[in-house]
Amino acid sequence: MEVILRVDIEKLGQRGQIVNVADGYARNYLFPKRLAVPATEANKKIVEQERQAYLRREAKAKAEAEELAQMLKDVTVVIPHKAGEKDQLFGSVTARDISEALAKLNFTIDHRKIELEHPIKQLGEYRVPIRLHREVTVEIGVHVVPEEPPEKS
């Protein structure tokens, strides 16, 4: 029996794919758990429409990510942080700190998109990649400077 998968199933296929399975497997497992639907002409048309809509959304998201990448490619954020001897930071600069610094420059970037291998623990200049989309990554500059002590009056 031919069925259209509604979800990815290991060793069977991906979502939207038409596969041939045993009648009993389809009736007793795939259909009741809503993992697949029969491969009728109507269902094939619906799946094709969903696929086209997905491709349009994906293309739009990629275009927006590329536009944002063009704006971000020359950006350098300056993050003041308390530091001790030998430029060692008290604490560290994390992806969340970089996201907050970008927000001050009117760029809303989720901290989970910032691919910081490990927190920054030294003063200095760094290049940090940001994955804006599956296929779009941009590097920004991060300059960690010593925090100025408050003036005593």
Image (cartoon, rainbow, N blue to C red):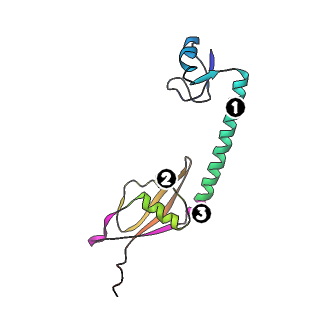
Left or right of residue 143, residue 60 in this image: right
CB under 8 Å between discs 2 and 1: no
* Mark 2 or 3, nearer chain start: 3
Residue highlighted by disc 3: 71
In the orientation shown, which residue stands out farthest toward the bottom? Answer: 153
Give the extent of the magenta segment: 69-92
* Mark 3 or 1, nearer chain start: 1
In percent of width and height, residue 3 lies at 62, 20
In percent of width and height, residue 106 lies at 56, 65
Badge 1: how crowded within 10 Å, few (<14), some, or many (20+)?
few
Q: Amino acid at mark 1?
A: Glu
Which of labels 2 and 3 is toward the front? 2
Badge 3: how crowded within 10 Å, few (<14), some, or many (20+)?
few
Left or right of residue 145, residue 25 in this image: right
Q: Say which residue appears at 55% left-offset and 46% top-offset.
A: 134
Q: Amino acid at mark 2?
A: Lys
